[in-house]
């Protein structure tokens, strides 16, 4: 997502912060996608050098000094981007508590940082975007992180962090829109304070941890939530019936304003800059993570897969009309697939595989035109697969291991059907007849029009044809007159 231009132009993308500086003429230079990520950060030098800070030299420092450099220089550095640099040293607690910081964006992602996070966040209250994903950090989330009351995005995914989620994060309730703590070693129950306090959350990802217990009903207080990912944990119990309170997911519309709300303003003696960053989430399909950019604008997803959930799929979930992805696979869910699943007109990904679901596949499922990925395998479904323009296009593996299921695309013929002459839906036959008649009438009309134009054109343009036609008309009129007089 390109950044807006106000004063000078800047652009920041979540999970890989990029800051672009324009030339003196005011136009932003073209970017080369082939350039290494770290090279883009050299473009920050104009404003950073103006404040006595050179990012290239800074990145060459031993990372043992980086935590000190952040706090000692952050009076002058608004958005240090130090990701993708393979730093390996441990983070030291080099906080200078005597200084006030105006650090707005901190991106240390995609390095090899080790050790515990320093407990020095009290002096960084201006931070709005923190990305420490894809490192080797360990230990607990420092209690002082709760001091980041202006934080809109906290991304700690894919580290070795452990312990229970610190309750101090509930102090970030005013602005925190993205909380991604996935792929760590957090344990314990999903805290109720997440739903009670973090009402601005748009994306919540706690996937691939060791969370246990049931999903608290308090999570339904997150009315702005568009992406909920609790997959690959040890959660048990049922799916809360209050999911219909996810108001943002009940609307089949694009969140046109959300992307404009995530920005950071930099004011210096010579420029006024606004940096915007987008939120990226991940959809997992058969073990493969696929990035989904601008997730807070375009994506509406629930992923509770690979847990120990039991009970029925709540009927209230049918009110989430805007869902694009629903993954409840690899649980112990029972009962039937909700009958009104066809109401999900925007649904593109549906995975209910490896449960204990029974009953027939609802016929309304065949009415979802956008459905591009489907997996209902390894359940106890029975009966004939509904016939439609969509379901028969999926691979047979989407329905396999349902031993009493029959019909295309499975090779198993349903009882009462003639294998040599399988029953063709009436709607399809009607469509074929209608297409044949439409083609026939169109051909007749074109033939008549062509012949008529050819005849009239020849009479008007060729004198010999015109004379012959005149004599023919005179003879015909004379014969008719003679016959009438008799």
Image (cartoon, grey):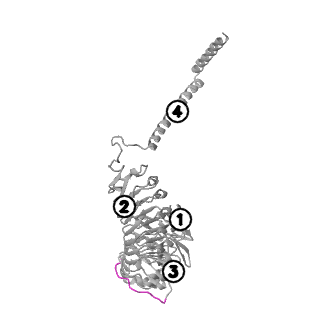
Seen as rendered, the residue at the extreme top is: 486
Mark 4 = which residue?
Answer: 446
**Magenta segment range?**
87-98
Mark 1 = which residue?
Answer: 255
Mark 2 = which residue?
Answer: 353
Question: Residue at (50%, 62%) from the top-left corner?
Answer: 319
First of labels 3, 4 by sequence position: 3
Distance Cα–Cα, label 3 vs label 1: 24 Å
Q: Residues within 10 Å of mark 2 (few under 14, many from 20)?
A: many
Q: In front: 336, or 223?
A: 336
Q: Are marks 2 and 4 in contact (CB under 8 Å)?
A: no
First of labels 3, 2 by sequence position: 3
Mark 3 = which residue?
Answer: 149
- Residue 460 place in picture, x, y as percent: 60, 25
- Residue 269 place in picture, x, y as percent: 56, 79
Distance Cα–Cα, label 3 vs label 2: 41 Å
């Amino acid at each position: 997502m390109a950044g807006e231009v106000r004063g000078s132009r800047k652009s920041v993308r979540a999970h890989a912060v990029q800051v672009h500086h324009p030339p003196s003429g005011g136009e932003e230079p073209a970017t080369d996608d082939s350039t290494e990520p770290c090279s883009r950060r050299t473009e920050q030098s104009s404003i950073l050098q103006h404040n006595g800070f050179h990012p290239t030299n800074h990145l060459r420092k031993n990372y043992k000094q980086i935590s000190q450099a952040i706090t000692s220089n952050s009076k002058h550095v608004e958005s240090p981007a130090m990701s993708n640099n393979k730093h390996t040293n441990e983070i030291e607690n080099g906080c200078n508590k005597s200084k006030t910081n105006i650090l707005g964006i901190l991106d240390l992602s995609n390095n090899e940082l080790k050790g515990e996070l320093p407990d020095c966040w009290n002096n960084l209250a201006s931070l709005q975007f923190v990305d420490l994903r894809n490192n080797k950090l360990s230990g607990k989330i420092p209690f002082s992180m709760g001091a980041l009351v202006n934080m809109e995005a906290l991304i700690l995914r894919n580290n070795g962090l452990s312990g229970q989620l610190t309750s101090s994060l509930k102090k970030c309730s005013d602005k925190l829109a993205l909380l991604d703590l996935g792929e760590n070693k957090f344990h314990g129950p999903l805290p109720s304070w997440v739903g009670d306090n973090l009402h601005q959350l748009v994306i919540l990802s706690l996937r691939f941890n060791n969370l246990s217990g049931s999903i608290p009903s308090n999570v339904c207080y997150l009315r702005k939530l568009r992406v909920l990912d609790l997959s690959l944990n040890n959660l048990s119990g049922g799916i809360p019936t209050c999911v219909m309170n996810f108001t943002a997911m009940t609307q089949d519309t694009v969140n046109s304003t959300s992307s404009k709300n995530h920005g950071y303003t930099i004011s210096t003696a010579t420029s006024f800059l606004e940096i915007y960053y987008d939120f990226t989430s991940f959809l997992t399909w058969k073990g493969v993570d696929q990035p989904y950019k601008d997730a807070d604008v375009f994506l509406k997803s629930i992923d509770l897969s690979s847990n120990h959930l039991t009970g029925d799929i709540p009927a209230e979930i049918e009110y989430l009309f805007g869902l694009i992805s629903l993954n409840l696979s690899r649980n112990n869910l029972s009962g039937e697939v909700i009958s009104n699943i066809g109401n999900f007109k925007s649904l593109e990904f549906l995975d209910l595989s490896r449960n204990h679901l029974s009953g027939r596949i609802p016929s309304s499922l065949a009415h979802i035109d956008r459905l591009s990925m489907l997996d209902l395998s390894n359940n106890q479904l029975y009966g004939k697969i509904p016939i439609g323009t969509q379901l028969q296009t999926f691979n047979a593996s989407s329905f396999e291991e349902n031993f009493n299921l029959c019909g295309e695309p499975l090779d198993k013929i349903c009882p009462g059907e003639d294998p040599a002459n399988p029953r063709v839906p009436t709607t399809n036959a009607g469509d074929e007849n209608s297409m044949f008649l439409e083609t026939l009438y169109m051909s007749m009309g074109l033939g008549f029009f062509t012949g008529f134009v050819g005849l009239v054109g020849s009479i008007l343009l060729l004198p010999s044809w015109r004379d012959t036609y005149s004599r023919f008309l005179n003879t015909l009129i004379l014969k008719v007159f003679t016959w009438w007089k008799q």
